[in-house]
Image: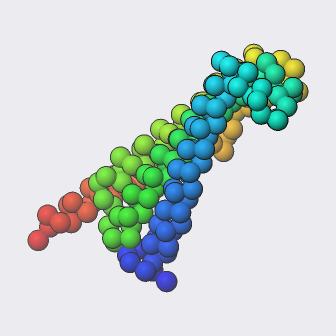
Amino acid sequence: MRALGPGSVSSFLKIILDVVYAALWVGVGVAVLMVIAALLFTFNPGLLDDVSLSTGQFAGKWPTYTGGLAAASLYMGGILVIVGTLRRIFMTLTAGDPFHPDNVRRLRLIGVILAALELGRYVVAAIGRWLLPGVAKVDTDMSLTAWFSVLVVFVLAEVFREGARLRREAELTI
């Protein structure tokens, strides 16, 4: 089976990325709606008085839940950007043009988003420790795997940049 072009492994992976991309849009939409609902309950907890649902366990905790949902929404948004960018990279792979100059920029964007997601995790963990002192453990450990992934993506971007340069030189050769 071929790696590039129509009917290849890359076109199959592109289809999977399309499905994941659509599912992420649904997930982000649901998360944003949950944040809006949590904000409504934060500012007006009496909204649930007419509903048979008991809010006893949630009383006074809506700001915490809202913050957690907002952080999850931002994280999912970052993943959405990464998957959308991967879809565009796989479009060029399916077209048989892996060293397209735009792929360098796309890979760099993925690296920046991955780094931002990891830094955001540290910020959320620090805020969680500060706001939720009763929680047994909020993970603030540095993830070597995440930072290694960021470095690998940036190295791949440079490999693609060099591939695009070599392709340009080959196109100029008679």
Give coordinates of residue 153: x percent, y percent: 49, 48
Can residue 6 be spotted in the picture? Answer: yes
Above or below — where is 37 with respect to 96? Answer: above
Left or right of 79 on screen, residue 6: left
Residue found at the very far bottom of the displayed protein: 1
Left or right of 164 on screen, residue 171: left
Residue at x-position 51% and y-position 56%: 21
Give coordinates of residue 127: x percent, y percent: 70, 20
**Quarter residue 88 falls in:** bottom left
Residue found at the very far left of the displayed protein: 174
User: Considering depth in this image, is 5 or 169 the residue closer to the camera?
Assistant: 5
Above or below — where is 136 with respect to 131? Answer: below
Give coordinates of residue 45: x percent, y percent: 73, 21
Q: Quadrant of the C terminus?
A: bottom left
Above or below — where is 122 with respect to 161? Answer: above
User: Considering depth in this image, is 127 or 116 the residue closer to the camera?
Assistant: 127
User: Considering depth in this image, is 125 or 70 the residue closer to the camera?
Assistant: 70
Residue at x-position 42% and y-position 63%: 90
Give coordinates of residue 131: x percent, y percent: 75, 17
Left or right of 174 on screen, residue 170: right
Residue at x-position 52% and y-position 57%: 22
